[in-house]
Amino acid sequence: MPSTFNTHNTNPLAQYPQAWDRASKVKILVLDVDGVLTNGQVWISADGKEALKAFDIQDGLGIKLLEQCGIPTAIITGRNSKMVLARCEELGIKHVHMGVEKKAIALEEVIKSLGLTSADCAVMGDDWPDLQMMKHAGLRICPAQGHEAVKEFSHLVTTQSGGNSAVREACDFILKAQGRYEALLTKARS
């Protein structure tokens, strides 16, 4: 059964030891987009093109906090979107793979290019196309609204939904597991 992480929990180690241990070893966070960074809705304009995507601002800060700690983020998604490229550029995400049918192959390319192993990798996905990629991750994360099969396969299921701070929750979990969260929070308060 997957773990559900409460961002207000002061001792996640006691409740989620396997996910906590795995998060302590993460060196890269790999994200799907639709249903993870967004709520999964796709707005199509009258000309048949994708018109809008909404991204959560707290997710963006979580990604930037990981980057400050030397943990990059990569995007691997099945769709092509100029909006995703713009958001990745804004956040400084350098590893962006769009229009990917075989996500596990793209994941392998990313981790190999960084000299990492699959055990170093956290992957967050919400539906069946993400399962093959997640299979190769040291830490598998699913947002709250993700498909039941993905939740069952995950080490951690967030309390928040995709596009609604689920990525931030995952980032905070990783930072806490690595003992970096409090220092970042103290710096933000000063």
Image (tube, rainbow, N blue to C red):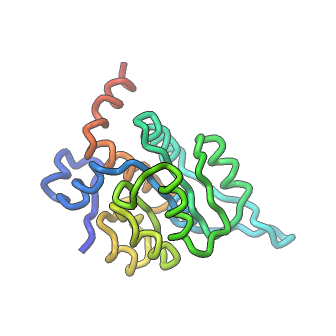
Instruction: Tell me: 23 left or right of 70.
Output: left
Residue 185 position by quadrant: top left
Q: Position of residue 42 (x, y in %)?
A: 66, 68
At a point 48% along the width and 45% down the height, the residue shown is 72
Most extreme residue toward the top, as rendered?
Answer: 190
Observer-nearest residue: 91 or 11? 91
Question: In which image quadrant can residue 17 be found?
Answer: bottom left
Q: Quadrant of the C terminus?
A: top left
Can residue 38 be seen in this snapshot?
no
The residue lying toward the viewer, choosing from 63 and 28, is 28
Horizontal relation, residue 58 to residue 99: left or right: left
Answer above or below: position of 170 versus 42: above
Can you tell which quarter of the image residue 159 is in?
Answer: bottom left
| Residue furthest right as drawn | 47
Q: Which residue is situated farthest in the left direction here?
A: 14
Q: Quadrant of the N terminus?
A: bottom left
- The x and y percentages for residue 19 are 25, 59
**In percent of the image, x 33 and y 61: which residue is there?**
138
Looking at the picture, how far across and down is residue 53, in whole percent?
Answer: 66, 58
Q: Is residue 181 visible?
A: yes
Residue 97 as seen in the image, left or right of residue 134: right
Q: Give the number of marks.
A: 0
Q: Residue at x 42, y 69 (%)?
A: 134
Residue 110, image x and y in percent? 53, 56
What residue is rendered at 50% in x and 63% in y?
108
Q: Is residue 54 above or below residue 71?
A: below
Q: Decide which of 136, 73 is in the foreground and name it.
A: 136
